[in-house]
Image (cartoon, helix red, strand yellow):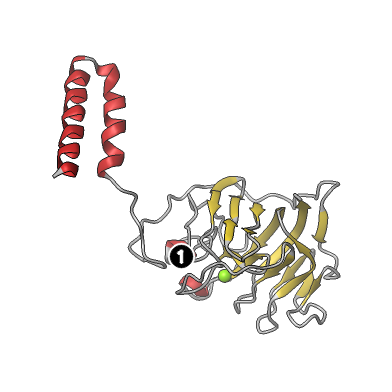
Amino acid sequence: MKALRIADFGLRIELRRLKSAIRNPKSAILAIGVIVPATMPAQQWPQHSMDRPRPPVVDPGPERPPVPAPKDAVVLFDGANLSEWRTDDGSPAKWTVRDGYVEVKPGTGTMVSARSFGDVQLHIEWATPSEVKGEGQERGNSGVFLMGIYELQVLDSYRNDTYPDGQAGAIYGQNPPLVNAVRGPGQWQTYDIIFHRPRFKADGSVERPARMTVLLNGVLIQDNFELVGPTANRQQPPYRMHADKLPLKLQDHGNPTRFRSIWVRNLE
Ligand code: MG
């Protein structure tokens, strides 16, 4: 009863505000601002939901030449060789280098950076195959795994429908991009990523989740998103304590997607 009475009291205040808003239009915005959050809780979507609204399409403009690394950056790939990269078992990286880019060689596995990183600003450019094959998740799929654990999806999302939390620019399985700012297949695209690693307490519990801000082709698509844990397909595993610095990984998903101009600025 007490709760009901409090709710009733709250409603009466809102009605009073609405009446005054009708008399005084300036207070209308305030009245609406108070009512809407109380009656419209944020909508939650199941992981990989196909019912989730698609992010609006934004044309980012024409492709550009490779962005050169700033002087304080660690250059991980400048088009020449894979000296900064390994495979998962530590042997030399096996992807194909040609004409200033590196292309996924399907079946050879993940490419792993020789160095480890924590908080970073990462620039990486990618192009999905110009010859369009497959649909949904099978078209130009790769991924940028921060710390080898947290995936920013790479996919041909140009007129290629899939679940929004799995399209290009999604934090895979967790958060769709704010907008779909991809260029067409075969065209070069840029990711500029600001990543803050999770902080763990001594007992292994999370003190602060990982956060990611991303620009795709200069357009903001992830705005300081707090990750709920490692990214995964059809599951949302909880955080597990890990080292402060870990290698970056690029995904072999069986599609010959290309990368170029990869550089990192350490933020810690
Ligand atoms: Mg992927």
Picture coordinates of residue 128, whole percent (x, y): 61, 66
Q: Nearer the viewer, residue 223 or 177?
A: 223
Residue 181 placement (x, y as % from top left): 53, 51
Residue 191 seen from this side: no
Residue 207 sits in which quadrant?
A: bottom right
Name the residue nearer the viewer: 230 or 137: 230
In the picture, measured across the screen, residue 121 lies left or right of residue 154, that is right
Secondary structure beneath dot 1 equals loop
Q: Nearer the viewer, residue 175 or 207?
A: 207
- Which residue shows up at 75% across the image and 53% down it? 66
Q: Amino acid at mark 1?
A: Asn
Q: Residue furthest front?
A: 2
In the rendered image of this protein, does residue 50 appear above or below residue 3? below
- State yes or no: Cβ of the residue under disc 1 lies below 8 Å from any atom of ligand 1: no
Residue extending farthest to the top is 24
From the viewer's side, name the closer residue of 96 and 131: 96
Q: Position of residue 256 (x, y in %)?
A: 64, 74
Q: Which residue is mark 1?
A: 160
Q: On the rendered structure, is 171 left or right of 252?
A: left
- In the picture, residue 23 is in which quadrant? top left
Name the residue located 31 percent from the left edge and 26 percent from the top edge.
30
Q: Is residue 219 above or below residue 198?
A: above
Q: Residue at x 64, y 63 (%)?
A: 127
Residue count near mark 1 (Cα–Cα under 10 Å), binned few <14, some 14–19, many ≥20: few
Percent coordinates x, y for residue 227 in the rendering: 54, 58
**Residue 3 as seen in the image, left or right of residue 123:** left
Quadrant of the frame with the N terminus = top left
Q: Quadrant of ligand 1?
A: bottom right
Q: Is residue 266 visible?
A: yes
**Labels in figure, total:** 1
Residue at x 70% of width, y 64% of height: 259
Q: Is residue 16 above or below residue 144?
A: above
